[in-house]
Image (cartoon, grey):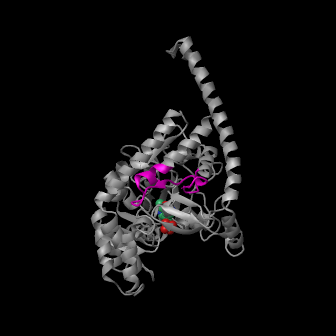
């Protein structure tokens, strides 16, 4: 039959639909216009409120590229420069106080200066900070991670970057293969082989189901680039297609992507990933640097019920001190025991970071407290969802454990391409409106909030209160 005869809608219903979609695009245009207006006004307020930050940044620019120690800390119009942080709060050099929802890019689940972490660090300071011969707390912390992740053997590093780098080396040694697979839009630290298709521009990125490998920085060799294959997240067929050749050492993936807001796996995706990687003899590495202990007591691994071959951790396990770790199944970690894989580092397992990690893992982020904080985050998620729903905004909230985010898209995103289609003008307007009212959110618009164990209900809900005033103005 002709296509139009297949339509079961009456003419009146069709007319209604057309009117609604016209209204939809009118509403979008109105929101975009309003967002620009808010941004313009708030940029002026930001400049007034943060004059000392601006001066400090101008000074720093003369001696540090972009005026910052890591390019992630450079954001528009210029970064807030902070003097101190306590509990859920930070104070900048102008004396402005913020409720911190960034929490060190998600590294401070314990909160700023958690008293138990601080006491452990204080005690350790009196006993020494670096021995370069083992301390007893190395085994204490490794045992705690083994219990949480169900993986028996661990090694420590100083960052998430090192943890993923070392895990990849183990995978290559275990398989005798060079190639690795990662997802488009995935971030795994700043070593060359994973600085590929982090946030590629879509005009270079190639087909959505078979993206090109795009270097995220100059200085990455063509040889390294040619060993990193990029696939879309939530596409098990794409994974199978690239593993078929039998030359892939590992698939490194965040089980829940947390560098494009929060991108959840489709039902069954990770189980399929596990089966496919096993079938082709490719190791599965879960990068839990962010999801780590914030997703639940046993990390995302525990929540999704899929056991990878290796796990990379960092951030929140250190309570604010620089630490990373990778752990795995006996047979893979035995490659280090046998000396086939060499894993090194002067500061690995240093007693100061170990003391902090031990306090975090055993005293601060207990199973009970973790559950409690996740429930507190649920209050915030519900409050923000209600505001979005009542205002019929083209946005939604995603929660994973103690983290959450507002994504400015109607439908839940499933991969990097969906994320790129979200509304960044609205996201920036919300961010700058919030920071001028004491809501410190990650600047990248691609990160998420973290409720720490030191946020009270009122601290958590402060975000929703400020968000409500933003939405009122946006929709007025
Ligand atoms: N993996 C993921 C998922 C991350 O989010 C990050 C840091 N944001 C890293 C690895 C790298 O960790 P680090 O910054 O400690 O090197």
Query: Which quarter of the rendering shows the C terminus?
Result: top right
The residue under the point 43% across, 74% down is 157
Return the residue nearer the eye: 453 or 421.
Answer: 453
The spot of residue 77 in percent (x, y) is: 68, 58
Look at the picture and state if 226 lies above or below 321: above
Look at the picture and state if 326 lies above or below 447: below
Look at the picture and state if 64 lies above or below 288: below
The residue under the point 48% across, 43% down is 384
The spot of residue 401 in percent (x, y) is: 39, 52
**Quarter of the figure with residue 166:** bottom left
From this viewpoint, is residue 262 visible?
A: no
Magenta stretch bounds: 434-462
Return the residue nearer the eye: 262 or 334.
Answer: 262
From this viewpoint, is residue 444 visible?
A: yes
Look at the image and say whether residue 322 sits in the magenta stretch: no
Return the residue nearer the eye: 98 or 285.
Answer: 98
Look at the image and say whether residue 453 sits in the magenta stretch: yes
């Amino acid at each position: 039959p002709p296509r139009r005869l297949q339509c079961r809608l009456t003419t009146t219903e069709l007319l209604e639909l057309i009117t609604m979609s016209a209204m939809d695009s009118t509403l979008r245009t109105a929101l975009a216009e309003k967002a620009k207006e808010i941004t313009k006004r708030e940029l002026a307020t930001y400049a007034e409120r943060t004059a000392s930050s601006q001066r400090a940044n101008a000074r720093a620019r003369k001696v540090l590229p972009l005026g910052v120690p890591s390019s992630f800390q450079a954001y528009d119009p210029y970064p807030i420069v902070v003097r101190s942080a306590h509990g859920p709060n930070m104070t900048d050099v102008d004396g402005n106080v913020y409720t911190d929802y960034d929490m060190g890019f998600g590294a401070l689940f314990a909160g700023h200066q958690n008293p138990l972490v601080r006491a452990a660090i204080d005690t350790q300071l009196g006993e020494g900070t670096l021995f370069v011969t083992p301390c007893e707390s190395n085994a204490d912390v490794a045992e705690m991670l083994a219990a949480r992740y169900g993986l028996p053997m661990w090694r420590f590093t100083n960052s998430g970057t090192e943890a993923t780098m070392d895990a990849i080396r183990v995978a290559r040694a275990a398989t005798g293969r060079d190639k690795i697979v990662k997802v488009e839009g995935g971030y795994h630290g700043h070593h060359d082989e994973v600085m590929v298709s982090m946030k590629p521009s879509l005009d270079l990125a190639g087909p959505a189901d078979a993206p090109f490998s795009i270097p995220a920085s100059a200085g990455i060799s063509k040889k390294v680039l040619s060993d990193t294959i990029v696939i879309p997240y939530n596409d098990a067929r794409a994974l199978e297609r690239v593993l078929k050749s039998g030359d892939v050492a590992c698939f490194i993936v965040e089980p829940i992507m947390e560098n494009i807001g929060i991108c959840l796996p489709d039902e069954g995706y990770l189980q399929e990933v596990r089966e496919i990687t096993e079938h082709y003899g490719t190791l599965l590495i879960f990068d839990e640097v962010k999801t780590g202990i914030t997703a639940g007591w046993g990390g995302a691994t525990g929540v999704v019920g899929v056991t990878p071959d290796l796990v990379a951790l960092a951030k929140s396990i250190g309570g604010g001190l620089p630490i990373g770790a990778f752990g795995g199944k006996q047979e893979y970690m035995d490659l280090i025991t046998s000396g086939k894989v060499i894993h090194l580092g002067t500061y690995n397992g240093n007693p100061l970071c170990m003391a902090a990690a031990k306090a975090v893992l055993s005293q601060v982020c207990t199973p009970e407290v973790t559950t409690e904080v996740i429930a507190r985050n649920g209050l915030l998620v519900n409050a923000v969802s209600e505001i979005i729903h009542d205002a019929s905004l083209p946005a939604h909230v995603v929660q994973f454990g103690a983290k959450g985010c507002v994504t400015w898209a109607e439908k839940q995103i499933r991969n990097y391409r969906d994320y790129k289609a979200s509304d960044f003008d609205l996201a920036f307007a919300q961010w700058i409106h919030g920071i001028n009212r004491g809501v410190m959110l990650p600047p990248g618009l691609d990160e998420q909030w973290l409720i720490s164990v030191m946020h009270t209900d009122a601290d958590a809900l402060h975000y929703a209160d400020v968000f409500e005033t933003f939405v009122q103005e946006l929709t007025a």
